[in-house]
């Protein structure tokens, strides 16, 4: 039997353990490192590591780039997995392509967050777009990802990309133009985190909606949507957006590196219904390159919730405000100061 893992606590949240194992009954020992993410007070999710590529603490959040055995390079912010090399295409295709495909002719996109560049990469596959604005508050995260995430280097240098370092709320408010699609590629709402205010009714009502064109579409990632986790923030974000937009839909899928089903909320004042065949036609006509995950049939199926989640969405009464916010388990940087 191997010795008990030795766990090193980094800032009290991100954890790297060192484990000693015997090989085939022999005495030869082999060291391996693990990263542990706290899913909840009584649940952890562990990754075996090849190495820790880089760690930093920015003004806003704790940053780590890990080389994991199962999921490749993984970006972790404030102890929460943001994306992993082998399956980030699932999350980012689901975030970006539904609103762009549902829009009749998208020309401009504003991405809130998205510092790693993957959301911009997916948006730039759409031939109709003239400009993609990506606004992330954390320059260190953006610089970090430009340096280490090779897959997105072409997106970062694309002539249609307008990269801005600023608070998304302040940036939207100061800009005079409106957008066809606004995307919330934000970190999950963490207590003391950098962006939970961008999930509130006042933000959607006073900042996002006024910056959408008449047939514009808003989409946001909405956190865990699994059978045991959907009440953390998913149903609340849905109910909050429902107070602001006429047409609101949710869709979900499993993201392996997140260890859960994930949710998105899409909204507009124009109907969002579009047939599966039409989605496939638009993918063929509009997108440069191949999608690995999304097609019309999947998108329609992803909008069908199981009985438990459907009932929770229907019965949700909480509206997200700055004073009455909900959070996923964990804490942001302010908690450590």
Image: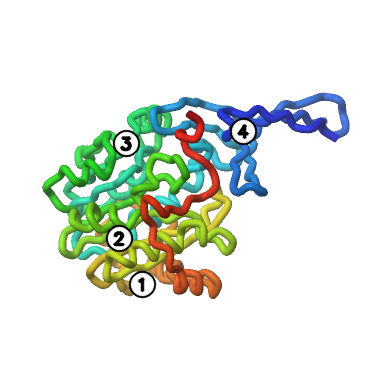
In the rendered view, does 307 fall on the left or right side of 178? Answer: right
Label 3, on which residue?
137
How far apart, in angstroms, are the residues tagged by discs 3 and 4?
A: 25 Å
**Callout 2: 10 Å neighbours few (<14), some, many (20+)?**
many
Q: Residues within 10 Å of mark 3 (few under 14, many from 20)?
A: many
Horizontally, residue 19 falls left or right of residue 223, namely right
Closer to us: mark 2 or mark 4? Answer: 4
Q: Which of marks 3 and 2 is nearer the N terminus?
A: 2
Task: Please give the name of the residue rendered at 47% of the width and 73% of the height, measured from the top-left corner.
Answer: 315
Residue located farthest toward the left when viewing the structure as drawn:
176
- Read off the residue under disc 4: 15
Provide the residue designation for mark 2: 99
Give how far across and how far down residue 8 sits, in percent: 65, 27
State how far apart marks 1 and 4 are (Cα): 43 Å
Q: In this view, does 300 lie above or below 221?
A: below
Q: Position of residue 158 (x, y in %)?
A: 24, 38
First in sequence, mark 3 or 4: give its number: 4
The answer to whether the residue labelled 1 contacts the one labelled 2, judged by CB atoms less than 8 Å apart, is no
Judge by depth and name the residue closer to the eye, 165 or 26.
Answer: 165
Describe the element under mark 2 as helix, strand or loop: helix
- Marks 3 and 4: CB-CB under 8 Å? no
Where is 191 relative to 199, above or below?
Answer: above
Q: Is mark 3 on a helix, strand or loop?
A: loop
User: Is residue 82 shown left or right of residue 25?
Assistant: left
Task: Tell me the distance, in whole angstroms, between the alpha carbons under discs 1 and 3.
Answer: 36 Å
Give the spatial CA distance, label 2 vs label 4: 37 Å
Say if residue 291 shows up in the picture. Answer: no
Considering only order in the chain, which callout, 4 or 1, is on the residue closer to the N terminus?
A: 4
Judge by depth and name the residue closer to the eye, 298 or 336.
336
Residue 91 - label: none
Return the residue at label 1.
276
């Amino acid at each position: 039997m191997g010795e008990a893992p030795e766990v090193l606590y980094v800032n009290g949240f991100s954890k790297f353990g060192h484990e000693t194992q015997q090989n085939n009954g022999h005495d030869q020992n082999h060291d391996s490192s693990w990263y542990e993410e706290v899913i909840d007070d009584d649940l952890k999710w562990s990754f075996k590591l090849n190495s820790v590529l880089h760690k930093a603490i920015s003004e806003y959040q704790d940053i780590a780039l890990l080389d994991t055995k199962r999921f490749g390079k993984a970006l972790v912010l404030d102890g929460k997995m943001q994306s992993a090399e082998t399956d980030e295409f699932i999350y980012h295709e689901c975030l970006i392509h539904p609103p762009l495909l549902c829009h009749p002719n998208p020309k401009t996109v504003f991405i809130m967050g998205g510092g790693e560049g993957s959301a911009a990469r997916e948006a730039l596959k759409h031939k109709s777009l003239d400009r993609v604005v990506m606004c992330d508050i954390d320059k260190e995260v953006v610089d970090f990802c430009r340096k280490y995430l090779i897959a997105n280097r072409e997106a970062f240098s694309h002539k249609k990309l307008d990269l801005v370092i600023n608070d998304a709320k302040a940036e939207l408010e100061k800009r005079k133009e409106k957008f066809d699609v606004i995307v919330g590629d934000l970190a999950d709402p963490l207590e003391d985190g950098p962006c939970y205010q961008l999930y509130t009714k006042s933000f959607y009502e006073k900042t996002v909606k006024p910056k959408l064109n008449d047939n514009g579409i808003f989409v946001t990632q909405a956190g865990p949507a699994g059978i045991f986790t959907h009440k953390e923030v998913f149903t609340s974000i849905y109910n909050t957006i429902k107070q602001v937009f006429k047409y609101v839909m949710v869709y979900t899928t499993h993201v392996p590196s997140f260890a859960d089903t994930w949710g998105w909320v899409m909204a507009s004042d124009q109907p969002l219904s579009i047939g599966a065949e039409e989605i496939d036609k638009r993918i063929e006509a509009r997108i440069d390159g191949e999608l690995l995950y999304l097609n019309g049939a999947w998108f329609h199926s992803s909008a069908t919730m199981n009985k438990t989640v459907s009932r929770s969405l229907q019965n949700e009464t909480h509206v997200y405000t700055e004073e009455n916010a909900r959070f996923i388990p964990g804490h942001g940087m302010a908690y450590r100061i």
